[in-house]
Image (cartoon, helix red, strand yellow):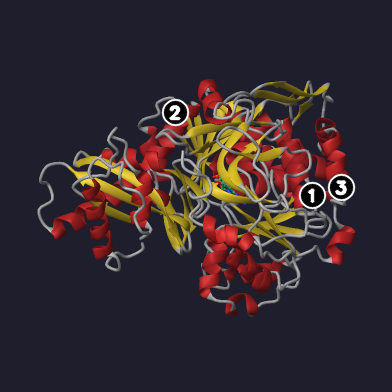
Amino acid sequence: MSDPVQSSGGGEALSALLHETRRFPPPPEIAAQANAQPGIYEDAAKDPVAWWATQAERITWDTPFERVLEWDLPFAKWFVGGKLNASVNCVDRHVAAGRGDKVAYHWVGEPDGETRTITYGQLHAMVCQAANALVELGVKTGNRVAIYMPMIPETVVAMLACARLGAAHSVIFGGFSAEALAGRILDADARMVITADGGYRRGAKAALKVNVDDALRQCPDVRSVLVVRRTGQEVTWEEGRDHWWHDIVDRQPTSHEPEFFDAEQPLYIMYTSGTTAKPKGILHTTGGYLVHCATTHHYIFDIKPETDVFWTAADVGWVTGHSYIVYGPLANGTTSVMYEGTPDAGGRDRWWRIVEEYRVSILYTAPTTIRTLMKWGEEYPAAHDLSSLRLLGSVGEPINPEAWMWYRKNVGRERCPIVDTWWQTETGGILITPLPGITATKPGAAMTPFPGISADVIDNDGIPVGKGQGGYLVITAPWPGMLRGIWGDPERYKETYWSRFPGQYFAGDGAKKDDDGDLWLLGRVDDVMNISGHRISTTEIEHALVGDSRVAEAAVVGASDATTGQAIVAFVTIKGDIVQTPEEGEILVEELRATVARTIGPIAKPRQILLTPELPKTRSGKIMRRLLRDVAENRELGDVTTLLDPTVVNMIDEKMKARAGTDDDT
Ligand code: WT7
């Protein structure tokens, strides 16, 4: 494990900044009306478990819970004995309360001008129809259903239909390959896949169904595939297995009598990269997760369901979309914007047109996107009426103070508080964040554990660090939205999260307490990279590379990148004398990049692959990634004395410098 403070790449710049940070107190008009008022921290701290029990009243329980928490470290059960239905909480109860005409989603397609408005009443009918269709196709409570979809309303409908039946969904981001999809379907033992012919991406039609067809060659147990027609592109069809959504779903009754499930009924499995080649199936259950999403959404985004228009600009295929496009906002009866495309589809002001048109009041996005918008220039937001915005959020990676300030000035117009929210697929919802009406924020800091959450920064020996010091972030008490395990692998669950510091949840992130005791997140301390806010494992890519029979060895590092946070750089040694000329080398590099895209997905394609005769190793044979990271980031080389052959790294370094400028960034 690397040094938490050094590994971030931004550690030194940050510590310089910590001492002269400006603070931005909450604007009085926000503070006066805020859902979270001073005192909330003390209230929660008195008895966190009791505080969460109070928050659980946001949810409609068919049977009330008997005990708030059963904690058999590291296995938690929340709201024990309670029964509920997540889809009823997200949809039916709002309709029953007379809010059926309220808009649940303003959906905006990537092709300009394509929009849909879906009210809670319509969403209810769609979810009921889809649930009835799933029953007809044989889905039962306790099953798993894989969802591989573009960003369209049917994706949300499919998730809620599964939840309604007590079948766990596993949404797989559309940017993953057929192979990655197959691995996840097999691991979850999903018997049904919901997909679309394709989706729109940067103006083109990207195919999805063809990847499902490919994947299912390895998944004989999948009996049915439900396909939404989105783009109209050609698809191949397997009679008996494949069904069009419009054939099966549209003819179903628009009502469905829900059953109620145990609070610990699995709600979904979301796969995420770990430090080994095999992704982890993070399991979330129903009651605690829903309480966590609804509560954090309410307080952190200061949601006023009557007036707010909330926009999480993320894909439903990641946890951010699950918690803050689907479950949190719907549980709170909020109106959301759901946008299908990239920020520049139809022009670099596309987002600002959406904000203006729908009067978006809260925008939640990732630093990588903010840096991209920054690069394009302030004239794009400046040309639009953004006066509806009152609160901004950031998630997915450390936000550099420069991006934070740009966001504040050009999007928030110096008026909107910014909440930098730290969390993970595993945590289910936000754990560390400012509260908009209370916290005086600092550019780049996630600041404070949410009420009812206990976190600390500790050193190698597990001792809490003092103010002004860095270490490892740990969560020291269970929380309602926490993962309940890794699907099918309780040992790996204990080992990954609970063994490094016994009794505490080890997040895998470095963090620092500043002189005021406020928290700054510094990035991963393990072999997991963060590319544009997406978690990608170095080991998984190395595995994909050595899967090519010509590759002898591969080492992958995340190098800091001005836009994407980190970028993937691979060092590869080739067997024998396969590569004779520079041209052959170029071709091989392109082929290897394509191999990674095929094995994992386009998001995992290395920015750069360097062919090298050897990799730098310690005398015990360990690849020295720290040195490779120095090379990849063009830094002065650190200590090389423990190397088996110090000349290797110098040679690689020279090669890298010689190539600088000749590589494109695609
Ligand atoms: C990792 C989790 C949370 C949803 C999106 C990513 C990094 C996340 C922040 C933040 C600094 C952050 C951490 C974490 N991260 N938010 N506000 N500041 N780092 O979910 O794919 O599970 O990745 O993202 O390194 O461990 P994920």
Q: What is the total number of numbered labels drawn onto the structure image?
A: 3
Marker disc for residue 598: none
Tell which tag, 3 or 1, sits nearer the viewer. 1
- In percent of width and height, residue 208 lies at 44, 47
Q: Is residue 526 left or right of residue 638?
A: right
- In percent of width and height, residue 627 lies at 35, 49
Residue in front for this viewpoint, 643 or 170:
643
Label 2, label 1: how far apart the Cα atoms are: 38 Å
- In percent of width and height, residue 205 lies at 43, 58
Q: Considering only vertical position in the picture, is 49 above or below 19?
A: above
Marker disc for residue 186: 2
- In percent of width and height, residue 525 lies at 50, 43
User: To which residue does mark 3 refer?
Assistant: 98
Residue type beneath disc 3? Gly
Find numbered disc 1 in the image and state the secondary structure of the residue it sits on.
helix
User: To which residue does mark 1 refer?
Assistant: 299
Residue type beneath disc 2? Leu
Residue in front for this viewpoint, 447 or 200:
447
Residue under the image location 30 percent in, 38 percent down: 618
